[in-house]
Amino acid sequence: MVALPAASTHGNRNVAGILFLLAIGMVGLAYAAVPLYEAFCAATGYGGTTRVATDNPKGIIARQMTVRFDSNIDGGLPWQVAPSKPVTDSIGAVETVVFTARNLSSKTVTGQAAFNVTPELAGSYFNKIECFCFTEQTLKPGETVEMPVTFFVDPDIDKNADLATIRDITLSYTFYASKNKGS
């Protein structure tokens, strides 16, 4: 058996320490991936993610846009959700539409909605001022509620050549049971 010099043993410890720290760093990045991705999508509109606004400071332009609404319900949520009818208005106009949800079960159920916008490029121009998707919704057995969404399409969409021919945007919600309470 060959004995290793003392310097080599010290070097091995350094390499082991670096590899250990690298492994810890990778685990930390794995846990941070989802929040970082969500923050990236919210900032850029990537993947049809909308923006949150308090009002429309840019005004209204003459170009018309139709916004359509869609709702999907995960199999684990005993709700019926009716989306709003489409609205057509000038880009920049602030609109409020209402989704109606009904709990079809005999127990109190809490749910939440995830959303996206298509076409995906339009997501960064779709601004929500108020939305039921920002919070969990708890419905008692048989309860029906109206859930408003207040939004506008940013007039800067008109400056994007890739969206020059777009006349329709779809705001889609997928409702799912919340793991936190009442489900």
Image (tube, grey):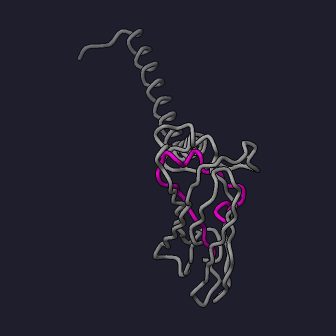
Q: Which x, y percent locates residue 87?
A: 60, 65
Q: Nearer the viewer, residue 81 or 125?
A: 125
In the rendered view, tell whether residue 1 sits above or below residue 138. Answer: above
Q: Which x, y percent locates residue 138?
A: 68, 76
Quarter of the image with the C terminus is bottom right
Q: Which residue is depicted at the point 59% across and 62% down? A: 88
Overall secondary structure of the magenta section? strand
Q: Nearer the viewer, residue 136 or 125?
A: 125
The region drawn magenta spans 110-134
Quarter of the image with the N terminus is top left
44 with respect to 18 (left or right): right
In the rendered view, tell whether residue 159 sits above or below residue 133. Answer: above
26 with respect to 92 (left or right): left
Q: Which residue is depicted at the point 68% across and 79% down? A: 145
Q: Residue 176: within the magenta? A: no
Q: Residue 118: within the magenta? A: yes
Outermost residue, left side: 1
